[in-house]
Image (cartoon, rainbow, N blue to C red):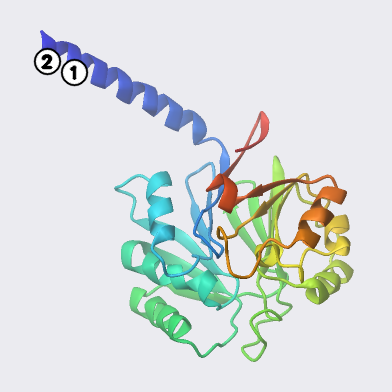
């Protein structure tokens, strides 16, 4: 009798979780992962396509955070993107290649002579993943009505510095848009604003972990975000986010979330609107 009751309860719980999972699968989900001082953003579309933009530093946190989101049996990611080859963005990607099967890699194409970047390039080759060098005008279709626009670099150029060749993206869907700025700094922001048309987005991934060299008035005025997310490590040695950036965000009346304070920041877009927590 006790065993029967236990099985009934277990079955009921599984059924409830199935319904929750089924309902949430209709949402476009974006997770700004808590990886310390670095960037890592995981996207899952309504049809289940999975995208990882950057992987944070090589501290094991990106794998740990993904294990909280992805089912234990899911060992594949459809698309991996690297905004630029600095260690706090690609270090964790080398750990991702060891755990997940990767179908496609897109990055800025900037060449960089570091051990982390050389390992990253070797992992792409060993994985047998397709590789594309990003350039402005590319549009990646992530789902039926979900698109990822490449805003920068203007063209793939291995000779650019990592920040000048930054991969900058805007994801758009019928329910909202998210702007991914990588570590883009103010001069490149101003160039992009002049170059681009409509880049308004409900969500802004704040540039360079909240450094005072990024997130200019010009960019904020062009994007007009309702919410901003800062991917930053607690008590980091750089003093990020800068007080100047926090003031600018406040002056533009933008509600701000920080991974050093909130942990992984979750954003869901569905037919009922935008949910951030």
Residue 84 - label: none
| Residue ranking furthest to the top | 1
Pointer 2 with pointer 1, Cβ within 8 A: yes
User: Relative to residue 191, is residue 102 drawn left or right?
Assistant: left
Residue shown at 74% from the left, 78% from the top: 154
Residue 143 seen in render: no
Viewer-proximal residue, 47 or 186?
Answer: 186
Q: In the rendered image, which residue does mark 2 sit on?
A: 3
Percent coordinates x, y for residue 3 in the rendering = 11, 15
Q: Quadrant of the C terminus?
A: top right
Q: Secondary structure at mark 1?
A: helix
x%, y% of residue 4? 14, 12
Q: For mark 1, what is the residue?
A: 7
**Front in this rendered view, residue 242 or 81:** 242
Tell whether 148 sits left or right of 98: right
Q: Residue at x 89, y 70 (%)?
A: 194
Q: Nearer the viewer, residue 212 or 136?
A: 212
**Counting other residues with Cα less than 10 Å from the Cα at mark 1, is it few (<14), some (14-19), or many (20 or more)?**
few
Residue drawn at 49 percent across, 70 percent down: 105
The answer to whether residue 277 is visible is yes
| Mark 2 neighbour density, 10 Å: few (under 14) some (14–19) many (20 or more) | few
């Amino acid at each position: 009798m006790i065993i029967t009751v236990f099985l009934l309860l277990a079955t009921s719980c599984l059924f409830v979780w199935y319904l929750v999972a089924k309902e949430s699968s209709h949402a476009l989900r974006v997770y700004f992962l808590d990886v310390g001082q670095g960037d890592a953003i995981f996207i899952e579309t309504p049809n289940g396509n999975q995208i990882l933009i950057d992987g944070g530093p090589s501290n094991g946190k990106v794998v740990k955070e993904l294990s909280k989101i992805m089912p234990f049996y899911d060992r594949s990611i459809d698309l991996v993107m690297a905004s630029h080859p600095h260690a706090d963005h690609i270090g964790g990607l080398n750990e991702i290649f060891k755990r997940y099967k990767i179908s496609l890699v897109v990055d800025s194409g900037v060449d960089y002579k570091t051990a982390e970047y050389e390992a990253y390039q070797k992992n792409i080759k060993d994985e047998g993943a397709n590789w594309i060098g990003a350039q402005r005008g590319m549009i990646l279709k992530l789902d039926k009505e979900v698109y990822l626009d490449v805003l920068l670099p203007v063209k793939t150029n291995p000779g650019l510095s990592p920040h000048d060749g930054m991969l900058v993206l805007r994801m758009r869907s019928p329910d909202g848009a998210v702007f991914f700025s990588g570590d883009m700094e103010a001069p490149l922001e101003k160039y992009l604003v002049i170059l681009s048309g409509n880049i308004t987005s409900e969500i802004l991934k704040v540039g360079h972990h909240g450094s005072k060299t990024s997130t200019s008035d010009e960019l904020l005025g062009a994007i007009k975000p309702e919410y901003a997310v800062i991917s930053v490590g607690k008590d980091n040695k750089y003093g990020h986010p800068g007080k100047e950036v926090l003031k600018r965000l406040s002056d533009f009346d933008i509600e701000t979330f920080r991974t050093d304070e909130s942990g992984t920041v979750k954003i869901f877009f569905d037919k009922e609107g935008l949910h951030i927590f």
